[in-house]
Amino acid sequence: MRTSSQLDILNLAASAFVMAGVAVTVGRAVGLGTPPRLQASTHPVSESSEEAEHHSIPWEDKRRLIEKYGKWAVDMAEGYCPHNDVACVEREAKRFQEVFRYRRGT
């Protein structure tokens, strides 16, 4: 059987755990606490960089497709298609853009 001091300590620990979780959630919701290297960038990372990101299609093709269909459509298509399949990414980006325009009425 636990004494009241042990229960007080457990309640304090549980409260601290919950408050820390709430603080992290609120911080992420308002954009605080995300390190700059983890935030989305608008420019490609050079391949010689140590923190080079992995992408399934070459940057030249991705840049061309972004100009044509938009970043959102290309990123969605890139996640959907097999690795290094530029034709699939282009086809799906076109489809995503058409569906978006159709549903938004633009």
Image (cartoon, rainbow, N blue to C red):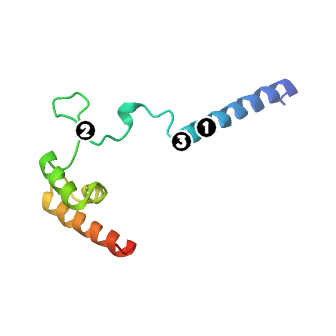
Observer-nearest of 11 and 57: 57
Q: Position of residue 38 (x, y in %)?
A: 38, 35
Residue for point 71% across, 29% down: 13
Residue for point 23% across, 41% down: 54
Q: Quadrant of residue 26?
A: top right
Q: Position of residue 93 (x, y in %)?
A: 24, 63
Q: Is residue 95 above or below residue 72?
A: below
Amino acid on which the number 3 mark rests in the picture: Val
* Gap in angstroms between the C-alphas marked 1 and 3: 14 Å
Question: Can you tell which mark lies on residue 58?
Answer: none
Q: Is residue 49 above or below residue 78?
A: above
Q: How many other residues sit within 10 Å of disc 2, few (<14), some (14-19) or many (≥20)?
A: few
Residue for point 22% across, 40% down: 44
| Label 1 SS | helix
Residue 84 can be seen, yes or no = no
Residue for point 50% across, 32% down: 33
Residue on which disc 2 sits: 53
Q: Earlier along the polypeptide chain: callout 1 or callout 2?
A: 1
Q: Earlier along the polypeptide chain: callout 1 or callout 3?
A: 1
Q: How many other residues sit within 10 Å of disc 1, few (<14), some (14-19) or many (≥20)?
A: few
Asked if the residue at tag 2 contacts the one at tag 1, i.e. Cβ–Cβ closer than 8 Å, the answer is no
Of all residues, the one furthest to the top in this rendering is 5
Q: Position of residue 102 (x, y in %)?
A: 34, 75
Residue on which disc 1 sits: 21
Amino acid on which the number 2 mark rests in the picture: Glu
Residue on which disc 3 sits: 30
Residue 105 can be seen, yes or no = yes
